[in-house]
Image (spheres, rainbow, N blue to C red):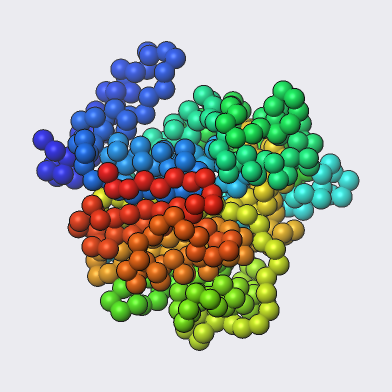
Amino acid sequence: MPEHSIPPVARRYMRTALSAVLAISVAGCAGHRYSPMRLVSHMFGPSPGALIGTVSSDEPQATLVGRDILQRGGNAADAATAMGLALSVTLPSRASLGSGGACLAYRPGDQNGGRAFMFLPVAGTVTAPDMPHADRPAAVPMLARGLYLMHLQYGSAAFSELVPDAIALAANGINVSRQLAGDLAAVQVPLLADPGIRAVFSRSDGKALAEGDALVQTHLSGALDQIRSMGVGDLYNGALGQSFVAGSQGAGGGLQMSDMRSAIPSERLPLSLSSGETQVAFLPPPADGGLGSAVAFRAASSSDAATRAQASIAAWRAQNGNHASGTGDDMTARAQAFVNGGGGSGGGLPSLPASTSFTVVDHSGMAVACSLSMDNLFGTGRMAGNTGIVLGASPARLPLPLFTAAIASQGRAFRAAAAGSGQNDAAAAVGIAMRQILAGQTPDAHPVTAQGRINAVSCPHGLPGDASTCTAATDPRGAGLAMGPR
């Protein structure tokens, strides 16, 4: 009997019961780690050849993880959660467990274009001047908590079932991607000065790992396994958190357990614009890249979209600061009025930190688009003791990057999603790409702006509906991977 013919309550009961049996049966299988979801999906997952969804990211192995979760019966939020955790292993220069970010999530029928989940980098306690590396304060690690909150609202599988892929990538090793190799090459001299980083990211000849080299992260796999078994809270309130804080202090990061406990992600309404019958949702401030994307989306032409986007973000930051006053949806309303008034003009942005992005859409039309950053390549360039977690950089010392993502819907159906990176051009890239997609262009492998890079999904017939026409794309200047609906 196919899963869709089983009532949801009965299906949940059957999965719970079967998972309990499986947990008992595999307990004696030494040397192997199984995910209940992986086994259950053989009975309840999509049939071979079924339309399952589209996935795109800047890092191929993360895309494959998301694709695998969809094939095993997970929804878009499940896949996005697993992808974010996988990126902490495969692209720690931009998305370690020490990073922050923001995600948009949408399910068909959502009001206001879905929900925004904000887990941007948060400054920790300032270190004493005489502490080692005190010039590199660390950000509070927000990735795990942010993904957990998004998954809590939109996911279908247990969170613990989405961690084993990242554990396996860390423990068994990966081949360094072109993106990671490029990031290592860009900062290898100061980066490899840290013994913890050097032990993981250097070759036997003392040089940084290159594309194709093996990268094994044993300590990180242990931290991820502790999150899987003890829950995300262990990183913020438990033994793993204590180890992380101790490692941070040893590296001059200046974090305290009180910083860990008090850094809470938030759920907010997105910025929303209309284009005919289509509603486009953007990340709201303090992810002000979404504000820039909204301005670029409304620009008369692509030629001035990047300039207008950056000028509007600069004006917003000048008026409100990087950490804008006000909280929650009140701040979103202020940003909405700012965009509706045409945004700001004049001024520019300083050189902004690197980021990464990904998008995923499942066959039902649920979509998630995320942007993540360490607030600097490899954050502080330091590792938190024996946790294997690279410390993100504190936004108290560096400006926030442009976290930006957008999701378009029409009526009760998903239409398109885009998320961006690429320093100062990230916001404009998402706004321009979304405008082009809704005008009928197919997202393909061509650059949208000089630096901005996107991951995008377009379903011109809408979802739920004919998923065979959906397409996914990633910027050709990166080394990402986009996979279509089959």
Q: Give coordinates of residue 31: x percent, y percent.
A: 44, 14
Along the line of sight, the residue nearer the viewer: 425 or 89: 425
Query: At 32% across and 42% down in the image, what residue appears?
Result: 70
Query: At 49% across and 74% down in the image, what residue appears?
Result: 302
Vertical placement of residue 443 versus 140, above or below: below
Q: Give coordinates of residue 209: x percent, y percent.
A: 66, 32
Vertical placement of residue 380 versus 240, above or below: below
Quadrant of image for the N terminus: top left
Along the line of sight, the residue nearer the viewer: 82 or 122: 82
Q: Residue furthest bottom?
A: 341
Q: Is residue 190 left or right of residue 10?
A: right
Query: At 50% across and 30% down in the image, what residue appears?
Result: 169
Q: Is residue 176 left or right of residue 282?
A: right
Q: Give coordinates of residue 179: x percent, y percent.
A: 58, 44
Along the line of sight, the residue nearer the viewer: 438 or 138: 438
Query: At 50% across and 70% down in the image, what residue appears?
Result: 293
Q: Could you tell me if residue 264 is visible in this image?
A: no
Quadrant of image for the C terminus: top left
Q: Give coordinates of residue 128: x percent, y percent.
A: 84, 49
Q: Could you tell me if residue 2 is visible in this image?
A: yes
